[in-house]
Amino acid sequence: MKALEDNKIVELYLRREETAISQTAEKYGSRLQSIAYGIVEDQHTAEECENDTYMEAWRSIPPHEPKTYFFAFLARITRHIALDFCKQRSRLKRSAHICELSAEMEQCIPAPDDTECRIDAIVLCDAINAFLATLSEEKRNIFMRRYWFMDSIADISQSYGLSQSNVKSILFRIRNQLREHLNKEGYEL
């Protein structure tokens, strides 16, 4: 059976038809599970995160109508559910994988340590998006796969046919460029 287009799946959610969930699972289930697995590193938990994503999508549509960005909408939900699971699982001990990625990005992005910085989060998001728009599609995808989808260096290198050291170098250069871009935008790091 051919998968439905995103806007048709969203219409099913809007009409409150339960087939919306099965259509979503058929089209995006493995990708959502992969996102969750990259964060929680446990297959059973990744499956739970995927299922929780469908329930959250059911609750969120309506009022949201993500017809043109359905996968991004689902991926964001999955990512938040998986990160919340990690926080619940080890409140005192964070996953080494999450710590590694956080440490890499802390060198580029200021931490929200006061109210003013939290208010600037929207402006910071715009600055990061503007920076990402300057990158080639391949570099932007490598960056997003590492820091949004939390893919491993090995997975990224395999997908792009690059050596792991090449991927690490690309990410290092992008982080440095991001740091310079944010400095020019007035962010002190």
Image: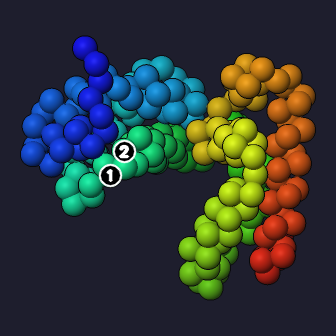
Q: On the picture, is 86 further left or further right than 172?
A: left
Q: Secondary structure at mark 2?
A: helix
In this orientation, does residue 38 appear?
yes
**Mark linked to residue 66:** 1
**Is residue 1 or residue 173 the one in the foreground?**
1
**Mark linked to residue 128:** none
Tag 2: residue type? Phe
Toward the bottom, the furthest residue is 116
How far from the left and from the top, in percent, is residue 137? 69, 43
**Is residue 14 or residue 104 the one in the foreground?**
14
How far from the left and from the top, in percent, is residue 72? 45, 46
Q: Is label 2 in contact with label 1 (beta carbons under 8 Å)?
A: yes
Identify the residue position indicated by label 2 in the image: 70
10 above or below 168?
below
How far from the left and from the top, in percent, is residue 151? 65, 32
141 above or below 109?
above
The quadrant of the picture occupied by the C terminus is bottom right
What is the distance, in whole Å, between disc 2 and disc 1 at their CAs?
5 Å
Tag 1: residue type? Pro
The quadrant of the picture occupied by the N terminus is top left
Q: Residue at x 22, y 60 (%)?
A: 63
Q: Residue at x 44, y 31 (%)?
A: 32
**Is residue 10 or residue 78 the one in the foreground?**
10
Q: Quadrant of residue 185?
A: bottom right
Q: Secondary structure at mark 1?
A: loop
